[in-house]
Image (cartoon, rainbow, N blue to C red):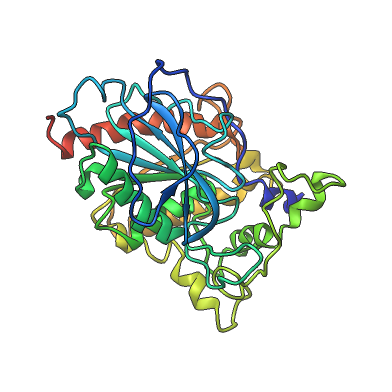
Amino acid sequence: MLTTALLTLAAPVTPAHADPAGAPPPLTDGFGLTQTGSVTGTATNFVVTVTTPEVSGEHRIRILLPRDYAADPNRRYPVFYFLHGASDDPGNPGVAYPALTATQSMITVIPDGGRRGWYTNWLDQKTAAGAQNWENFHIKQVVPFIDANLRTLTGRTARAVGGLSMGGFGALHYAQAHPDLFGQVASLSGANELSRNHAVMRGAVVATLTNAGAALCGPSGGADCALNFGPTVSSDAIFGTPYPFFDADWRWNAADPVANADKLARTGVALYAGNGGGNPADMEFWVESATRHVKERLDALGLPSHYVNYGNGTGWGTACKGGHTSGCWAQDLADYVPRLETAFATAVPSP
């Protein structure tokens, strides 16, 4: 069922390991962010809820601090921004990533990206979804908010962005649009091609906008159903009409990670994808070609990358069958996190 495949852009994963008890550090409002309610969690794994004029509603940001953060007040740390997939919520304790823990030597920030925000500023800000300036929220607000409140290293070599599925696209988009901010980028099963040459990926975006999956959530529509992406909006809401050869086609092409591969010239790149078991009904089947096209473009430009095509998942962790699932993403992160820490250690001298 290709329609279902287009809608299955993310899946729940196993909660992270429990952290030591303690209070999270106090955070001060700023950069357009206003905290609402109390911070929840532990000293090293907590969630802050904010509002912003840039995006309608409340938004949760999960922050993971190294275990020695409080004990070593003179030390500053690199930061990894991890972007979730469609229908995920970083505040949900069931949406965690086992390879991202407080045992690492970096700060990890998982900001809300909306159920289908697509990590960009929408063309149409007057839909039923309200304000949807996700790129402004993350780049102009969350990043400086984190730098102002936590002991971060602020150079591009000490800042990385990665993500899965919808967030994999977001990671490449942010790294390409803001090369001054991010020195490393990782895309895990990312929706990595938006040109007219990959209509299925455009279809995935449209399916979330038009909320085509809500009908599969039962008679009530299921507000918490993973296939319910929120109020129905036009297929044109983000980039304009998705149909080739119309006036807005250039906007989709302008955001296409393949077309913008040259903007990763100074950035460390990691790409992961499987083949969905060769089944077109599995979104990973389509992700594989989109990711391969990014790799081929980087190769043509003479730009290095760490590329893993784990096919049907054989040998890629015990829970990966090559599909668009958390079992594969967990192994992606298990491979990537040590590489990122090595890159940070090489680029940023130890304190």
256 to the left or right of 341: right
- Which x, y percent locates residue 109? 39, 39
In percent of width and height, residue 247 lies at: 56, 84
Q: Quadrant of residue 349?
A: top left
Provide residue 110's location: percent of width, then percent of height. 44, 40
- Residue occupying the point 84% across, 44% down: 218
Res. 291 in view: yes
Which residue occupies 56% across, 51% down?
114
Identify whether 181 is placed above or below 245: above
Q: Nearer the viewer, residue 328 or 303?
A: 328
Given the current orientation, which residue lies at the most extreme top position? 20
How many numbered discs, if any?
Answer: 0
The picture places residue 298, in percent across and down from the top left corner, at 35, 56
Q: Is residue 71 shown above or below 273? A: above
Q: Is residue 187 visible?
A: no
2 or 326: nearer the viewer: 326
Q: Identify the image quadrant of the C terminus.
A: top left
Question: What residue appears at the point 62 percent right and 37 percent down from the top-left corner?
Answer: 11
Camera-side residue of 343 and 279 = 343
Q: Residue furthest bottom?
A: 247
Does residue 75 appear to the left or right of 15 in the view shown?
left
Outermost residue to the front: 37
281 with respect to 307 (left or right): right
Question: Does residue 94 appear to the left or right of 147 in the view shown?
Answer: right
Q: Residue at x 63, y 69 (%)?
A: 127
